[in-house]
Image (cartoon, grey):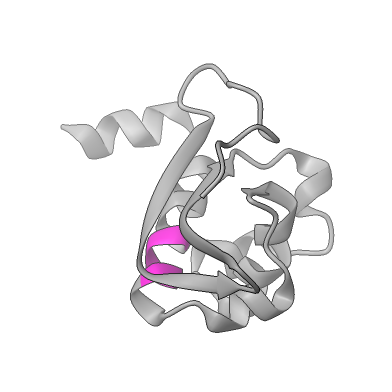
Amino acid sequence: MTKHTDIPAQPNNATATVTLDTPITRGEQTITRITLRRPKAGELRGVSLADLAQMEVSAIAKVLPRISDPFLTSEDINKLEAPDLMAIGTEILHFLLPKDVKASLAT
């Protein structure tokens, strides 16, 4: 896999990397890790935050190409195994939580 270069370094845990249990094959490329960036409001346009909080597959699939490196196509997303989709959804949910909620969960 190539080095992640599309998503610049972000402060305050603004990125997360998910190592896939089951890699995705796209042509000759094998994707084993996906780096996610905390979504901005514009990247959440057209998606219900409640659906993301409930980890609705369609909501995750809509946001994921907007925040992933490497860029994931809908075909790539459809190839994700359930445990990998759950790990990605959990990271997206974590990005949406306010700092005080994250702090209370850590204790």
Quarter that holds the C terminus: top left
Front in this rendered view, residue 2 or 14: 2
Check the image and name the residue furthest to the left.
Answer: 107
**Percent x, y for residue 85?**
45, 71
Give the prevailing secondary structure in the magenta stretch.
helix
Between residue 40 and residue 77, name the one nearer to us. 77
Instruction: Please give the name of the residue rendered at 65% of the width and 59% of the height, measured from the top-left corner.
Output: 64
In the rendered image, residue 86 lying in the magenta stretch gets the answer: yes
* Magenta segment includes 42: no
Residue 11 sits in quarter: top right
Quadrant in which residue 20 is drawn = bottom left
Depth check, front residue: 9 or 106: 9
Residue 15 in the image: x percent, y percent?
Answer: 52, 34
Magenta stretch? 84-88
Q: Residue at x 65, y 71 (%)?
A: 61
Q: Position of residue 79 (x, y in %)?
A: 54, 82
Residue 55 location (% of width, % of height): 50, 70
Q: Does residue 100 appear left or right of residue 79 in this picture?
A: left
Task: Indicate whether 23 appears above or below 49.
Answer: below
When asked about the image quadrant of residue 2, the answer is top right
Q: Residue at x 42, y 80 (%)?
A: 81
